[in-house]
Image (cartoon, rainbow, N blue to C red):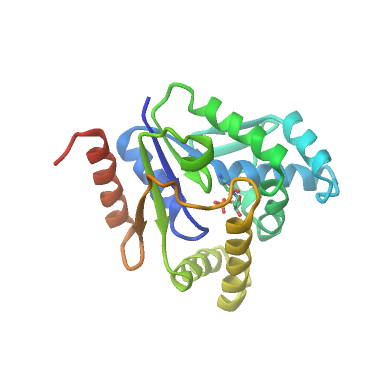
Amino acid sequence: MMIVTIDGPAGAGKSTVARALARRLGYRFLDTGAMYRAVALAGMRHGLDLDQPDDLARLARRVQLRLEGEKIFLDGEDVSAAIRTPEVTAVTRYAADNPAVREHLVRLQREAAGRNDCVTEGRDQGTVAFPRAECKIFLTAGAEERARRRFEELRMKGEPVTFEQVLAAQRRRDEEDSTRAVGPLVPAPDAVEVCTDGLSVEQVVDRLEDIVKKGLGIGD
Ligand code: DC
């Protein structure tokens, strides 16, 4: 079993390149951010007070989360699009900041990886979920570049946001991600850091593929 972890801040291009890398290598892809989003969505739908950590943790353990290819199912319903709205994004921190939710989701992530070769993407994959992964990547990009990418993405979807709003929301999330008490965003000591500024998706995936193959002792 070969595990490749890709961690990094929001907007560094993780999901796009992690998916593409998984496809190229023929590995399973685990989008762990989707799991935190789905727990937050479940909390919203059940009308929970998200500030009550025990209630949200209980719900997280009760619902069924299934990652299937690039889709995520919550109690059998495909919620892949529903978890990406700005409303869900804004409350996902209640799931991500909740130690009991994190513990449960890390367990699900290890189960989902099982005996498969996997590319797994998130914030704590190389540090907490898979500390013994064969290959760890920490993907970064400058704050402005990340916000510009996210802004373009939202604009394409017709979301009425300004660049300044996207940049401000990203600053908040960066702060939350890096100061979280459990599972904060930090590079694993043995992670290879890759900055994606000025690189195309293709170029980043090429570089990651190189890193993975070198790590495995194949390639040049
Ligand atoms: O990558 P994303 O934007 O879909 O992640 C959503 C949120 O979930 C993000 O703000 C941080 C959190 N997250 C986390 O705490 N740990 C992970 N392994 C993945 C995501």
Residue 95 screen position, x and y as percent: 70, 46
Residue 39 screen position, x and y as percent: 70, 42
Look at the image and tell me whether residue 77 can be seen.
no
Number of numbered markers: 0
196 or 176: nearer the eye?
Answer: 176
Q: From the viewer's perspective, is residue 114 above or below residue 65?
A: above
Look at the image and tell me whether residue 68 can be seen.
yes
Q: Residue furthest front?
A: 189
Which quarter of the image is occupied by the N terminus? top left
Residue 130 screen position, x and y as percent: 48, 34
32 or 98: nearer the eye?
Answer: 98
Q: Residue furthest left?
A: 220
Quadrant location of residue 28?
A: top left
| Residue shown at the point (35%, 43%) measured from the top left | 21
Residue 45 screen position, x and y as percent: 79, 45
Image-based side of 218 in relation to 91, left or right: left
Which quarter of the image is occupied by the C terminus? top left
Q: From the viewer's perspective, is residue 194 above or below residue 110?
A: below
| Residue shown at the point (53%, 44%) measured from the top left | 124
| Residue shown at the point (64%, 44%) measured from the top left | 36
| Residue shown at the point (49%, 61%) measured from the top left | 11
Q: From the viewer's perspective, is residue 40 above or below residue 65?
A: below
Q: Residue furthest top?
A: 115
